[in-house]
Amino acid sequence: MNTDDISYAPLKELAKEIFSGAPIYNIEKFSNSPDGIPLINIKDIVDGQIEFSNLSYLDPETINKPERFTVYPGNVIVTCRGTQLKIALVPDAIKKAIITANLIAIRVKEGLSPLFLTAYLKTKKGQRALLTNATSTNVQLVLNVSDIGEVIIPVPSVSLQEKIANLVNVTEEQYRLSIESATLYRMITNQVIIDTLDK
């Protein structure tokens, strides 16, 4: 691949919007009822994916201007506080959700694939770039919107971005199937042990 075909730009120039989540600290506002809007927090990002089966829900009327904190499919989410840097893409299965103040969302412009951006930010080089301007201690990571906006992103051609995105999709699916198979084998093994000992 000719690296001359790759341009570079700060993320703030490639994004329509970069915004932080809602400052929600009152747990009484949360519910498990799907009648509200899903709420995404750090705990919901597992292995680079949003684990939406156990999301909390929120009545959007309990916060002021919820649209300021709303994410949609294709938005990229980055943790901005906590002990671990996590990156995930909002999947099509989540039509819209509100993110908490522990997260920052990136809504990209045309010409940059959100899946490619997510994949790059998950690489060691991408994570180093994210952490360059971060304020951190031995325990806590602190990122803000301006920090993320300054991260320099490589922008290959759209066709190459699509190839990388397709590769990521295949890899993630293989990983998911491997985890499911390993979990199934573990369950079978445990059952065999129990059945053997019960004889």
Image (cartoon, helix red, strand yellow):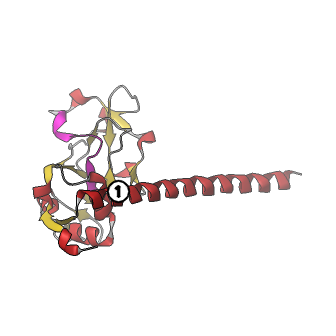
Indicate the secondary structure of the residue bearing disc 1: helix
Residue 120 shown left or right of residue 183 in the figure? left
Q: Is residue 54 magenta?
A: no
Q: Badge 1: how crowded within 10 Å, few (<14), some, or many (20+)?
A: some
Residue 196 visible? The answer is: yes
Residue 12 shown left or right of residue 107 in the figure? left
Residue 136 visible? The answer is: no
Q: Nearer the viewer, residue 183 or 111?
A: 111
Residue 80, given in percent of the width and then of the height, sits at 24, 57
Residue 98 shown left or right of residue 144 in the figure? right
Q: Is residue 78 magenta?
A: yes
Residue 52, given in percent of the width and then of the height, sits at 41, 42
Q: Vertical placement of 193 versus 28: above or below?
A: below
Q: Residue at x 28, y 46 (%)?
A: 74
Q: Residue at x 62, y 54 (%)?
A: 181
Q: Amino acid at mark 1?
A: Ala
Dot 1 corresponds to which residue? 165
Q: Quadrant of the N terminus?
A: bottom left
Residue 75, given in percent of the width and then of the height, sits at 26, 47
In the figure, residue 31 lies in which quadrant? top left
Residue at the outermost right position: 199
Q: Nearer the viewer, residue 3 or 119?
A: 3
Q: Nearer the viewer, residue 191 or 29?
A: 191
- Magenta residues (range): 66-80
Q: Nearer the viewer, residue 46 or 163?
A: 163
- Total labels drawn: 1
Residue 8 shown left or right of residue 60 in the figure? left
Q: Residue at x 28, y 58 (%)?
A: 159
Q: Residue at x 35, y 56 (%)?
A: 165
In the figure, residue 144 lies in which quadrant? bottom left
Q: Vertical placement of 122 versus 111: above or below?
A: below
Residue 95, given in percent of the width and then of the height, sits at 32, 35
